[in-house]
Image (cartoon, rainbow, N blue to C red):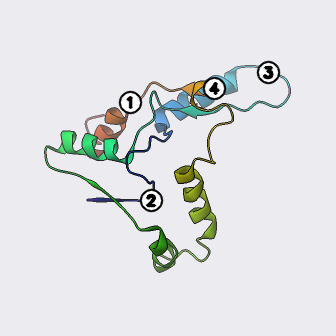
Amino acid sequence: MIPSFLQPLDKPVPMVGTADIGKVAAELLQGTWKGHRVVELEGPERVTPNKIAATFAKLLGRPVRMEAVPRGSWEALFKSQGMKNPIPRIRMLDGFNEGWIDFEHGEAGSLKGNVALETVLNALINPDVH
């Protein structure tokens, strides 16, 4: 069981692998532009918490499921973990869950990376293979 603050568990959210971040950062450092530039980067597809659990299950060969952490328990839980002011984190999670935090031009306007969820999770499970 994996506890999830991203809810509902079937809502796709943008995520990106660190390899994609590094590649895009290197490309941007080598490029030229003038003025202010914002690059919104996400992985090749948006993923749900349930898809993360299903991918872990596939890679591990055993059942894995997500479980939504009740919203009312977040503040006390985060404080018990040592967070002095959990409100900004809670507001960020609310923003993702309620949909008011997203890229300026939505999914269609973001740059897409190439590293798939399964690749990222496989590297976490088998770090010596990569």
Tell me the element at label 1.
loop
Q: Check residue 35 in the rendering and tell me which mark sits there, or answer none.
A: none
Choose the circle earlier in sequence order: 3 or 1.
3
Q: Nearer the viewer, mark 3 or mark 1?
A: 1
Residue 27 appears in the figure: yes
The residue type indicated by label 1 comes to: Ala
Q: Residues within 10 Å of mark 1 (few under 14, many from 20)?
A: some
Q: Would you say the residues marked 1 and 4 are in contact, meaning their CB atoms lie under 8 Å apart?
A: no
Residue 126 appears in the figure: no
Q: Is residue 28 left or right of residue 4?
A: right
The residue type indicated by label 3 comes to: Trp
- Residue in front for this viewpoint, 111 or 122: 111
Residue highlighted by disc 4:
109
Tell me the element at label 4.
helix
Residue highlighted by disc 1:
116
State which quadrant residue 6 falls in. bottom left
In percent of width and height, residue 102 lies at: 61, 41
Choose the circle earlier in sequence order: 4 or 3.
3
The residue type indicated by label 2 comes to: Phe
Q: Would you say the residues marked 2 and 3 are in contact, meaning their CB atoms lie under 8 Å apart?
A: no
Q: Hey, which residue is sitting farthest right in the picture? A: 35
Choose the circle earlier in sequence order: 1 or 2.
2
**Whole-number angstrom distance, CA of label 3 to CA of label 1:** 29 Å
In the displayed structure, 79 sits above or below 53; it is below
Q: Check residue 33 in the rendering and tell me which mark sits there, or answer none.
A: 3
Q: Is residue 104 left or right of residue 117?
A: right
The residue type indicated by label 4 comes to: Gly
State which quadrant residue 107 falls in. top right
**Whole-number angstrom distance, CA of label 4 to CA of label 3:** 19 Å
Residue highlighted by disc 2:
5
